[in-house]
Image: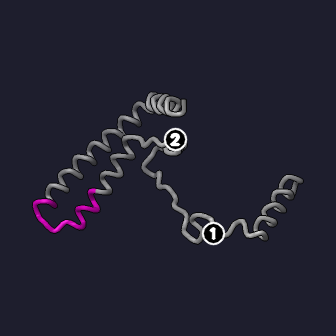
C-alpha cells in the first residue's frame, strides 16, 4: 500500500473509533441502485449527470408515468376505469418506444441537446 492509502485507512479507523459513522442517513437500509437497463449503454453516464443536475429526460418521465399508471391499474376495480388505464398505458408505451427509437437514430444530436441543457442549468 502507498502512503496515501495508509493515511486514508488510518483516518477512517479513527473516525470509526470516534463514532463518526453512527446514525448516518440511510444506515442499515439497502442501497437503491438505479435500473438503467432501458438506456443505451453509451448514454448512461450522461443520464446520471442529468439526474444529478435535477433534469429528468423525457423518456424517463414517460417510464415513470407508465409505472404509476400500471400501479393504478392493479388497484382499480371498475371495468371502465381499467379499460381507460389500459388505453392510456398503451399510448404512453407507444410514445416511449418512439422516443427511444428517435434517440437511437439521432444519439449524437440528442447528446448535444442534453449537454446544452446541463450547461444552461448549471450557469
Q: Earlier in the sequence, mark 2 or mark 1?
A: 1
**Is residue 20 one of those drawn in magenta?**
no
Screen quadrant of the N terminus: bottom right
Q: Is residue 86 above or below residue 111?
A: below
| Residue range highlighted in magenta | 69-82
> Residue 92 bears which disc, if any?
none
Res 108 visible: no
Q: CA distance from mark 2 to mark 1?
A: 27 Å
Name the residue rendered at 11%, 64% in the picture.
79
Q: Considering depth in this image, is 100 or 26 the residue closer to the camera?
A: 26
Chief secondary structure of the magenta portion: helix
The reply to whether discs 2 and 1 touch (Cβ–Cβ < 8 Å) is no
* Front residue (pair 51, 59): 51
Q: Is residue 80 visible?
A: yes
Q: Is residue 107 above or below residue 31?
A: above
Q: Is residue 103 above or below residue 80?
A: above
| Circle count | 2
Residue 20 at what x, y percent from top left? 72, 65
Task: Give the residue at x 81% y 60%.
Answer: 11
Which quarter of the figure has residue 57? top left
Q: Is residue 93 left or right of residue 109?
A: left
- In the image, residue 101 lies at what x, y percent? 35, 38
- For mark 1, does the 10 Å Cα neighbourhood hold few (<14), some (14 to 19), or many (20 or more) residues? few
Q: Nearer the viewer, mark 2 or mark 1?
A: 1
Quarter holding the C terminus is top right
Element type where label 2 sits in the image: loop
Callout 1 secondary element: loop
Disc marking residue 53: 2
Question: Alpha-carbon neighbours of circle 2 within 10 Å: few (<14), some, or many (≥20)?
Answer: some
Q: Nearer the viewer, residue 34 or 43?
A: 34
Q: Which residue is mark 1?
A: 23
Q: Residue at x 84, y 62 (%)?
A: 10
Amino acid at each position: 500500500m502507498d502512503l496515501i492509502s495508509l493515511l486514508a485507512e488510518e483516518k477512517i479507523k479513527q473516525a470509526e473509533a470516534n463514532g463518526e459513522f453512527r446514525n448516518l442517513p440511510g444506515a442499515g437500509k439497502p442501497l437503491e441502485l438505479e435500473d438503467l437497463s432501458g438506456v443505451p449503454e453509451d448514454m448512461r453516464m450522461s443520464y446520471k449527470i442529468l439526474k444529478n443536475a435535477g433534469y429528468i429526460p423525457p423518456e424517463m418521465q414517460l417510464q415513470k408515468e407508465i409505472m404509476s399508471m400500471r400501479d393504478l391499474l392493479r388497484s382499480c376495480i371498475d371495468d371502465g376505469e381499467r379499460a381507460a388505464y389500459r388505453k392510456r398505458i398503451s399510448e404512453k408505451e407507444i410514445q416511449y418506444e418512439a422516443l427511444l427509437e428517435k434517440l437511437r437514430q439521432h444519439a449524437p444530436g440528442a447528446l448535444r441537446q442534453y449537454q446544452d441543457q446541463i450547461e444552461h442549468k448549471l450557469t
